Image (cartoon, rainbow, N blue to C red):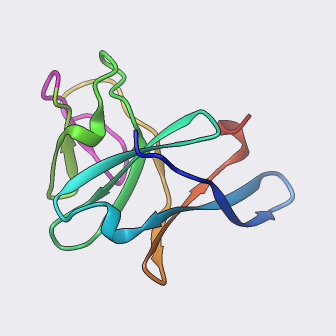
Amino acid sequence: MTPFEERVERRWSDGKTTWRSVDLGTVDSVPLGEGRAYTVNNLGIAVFRQRDGQLFATESTCPHRNGPLADGLVGDGKVICPLHAQKFDLTTGHCAGEDMAIRTYPVREVHGHIVVEIGPQTLA
């Protein structure tokens, strides 16, 4: 896991759910075509940066056998688990050909930083 000092940017609510945006550091900390793992309030998050620069964020482990997804192969909007070659769609979290999925998180680049949005159901 990458060392990380959490910086909360903002919180907002739609009356039912409170969300928060968390700055995970600079975009350059995730090389093109790779992923990196972060921990936010004991929540494991994997951030992927495709070769075209597009960012994705998911839970950090494969539900099959807890494979470290940030170490998987990334491309074409998908990540392949390095332990068992399960292929997950980085937008929906669905696993090709299997009845399992990973949680995905909204993520964007803001002034060269990675900002991920996390709902309260995943925070302590």
The single residue placed furthest to the right in the displayed view is: 15
Vertical placement of residue 85 versus 53, above or below: above
Residue drawn where x is 80% and y is 62% of the image:
14
Quadrant location of the N terminus in the rendered image: top left
Quadrant location of the C terminus in the rendered image: top right
- Of 4 and 111, the residue lying toward us: 4
- Of 96 and 58, the residue lying toward us: 58
Residue drawn where x is 19% and y is 65% of the image:
32
Vertical placement of residue 43 versus 10, above or below: above
Residues in magenta, as a range: 83-96
Q: Main secondary structure of the magenta part?
A: loop
Left or right: residue 71 compared with residue 18: left
- Of 17 and 67, the residue lying toward us: 67
Left or right: residue 1 compared with residue 88: right
Q: Write down the quadrant of residue 122 in the picture.
A: top right
Q: Is residue 21 magenta?
A: no
Tell me where residue 8 appears, x and y as whole percent: 69, 62
Residue drawn where x is 28% and y is 24% of the image:
67
Residue drawn where x is 37% and y is 70% of the image:
27
Left or right: residue 44 compared with residue 62: right
The single residue placed furthest to the bottom in the displayed view is: 111
Tell me where residue 40 appears, x and y as whole percent: 59, 44
Q: Is residue 93 magenta?
A: yes
Tell me where residue 71 appears, x and y as whole percent: 22, 39
Vertical placement of residue 10 versus 101, above or below: below
The single residue placed furthest to the top in the displayed view is: 65
Left or right: residue 82 compared with residue 8: left
Number of numbered tags placed on the structure image: 0
- Of 20 and 17, the residue lying toward us: 20
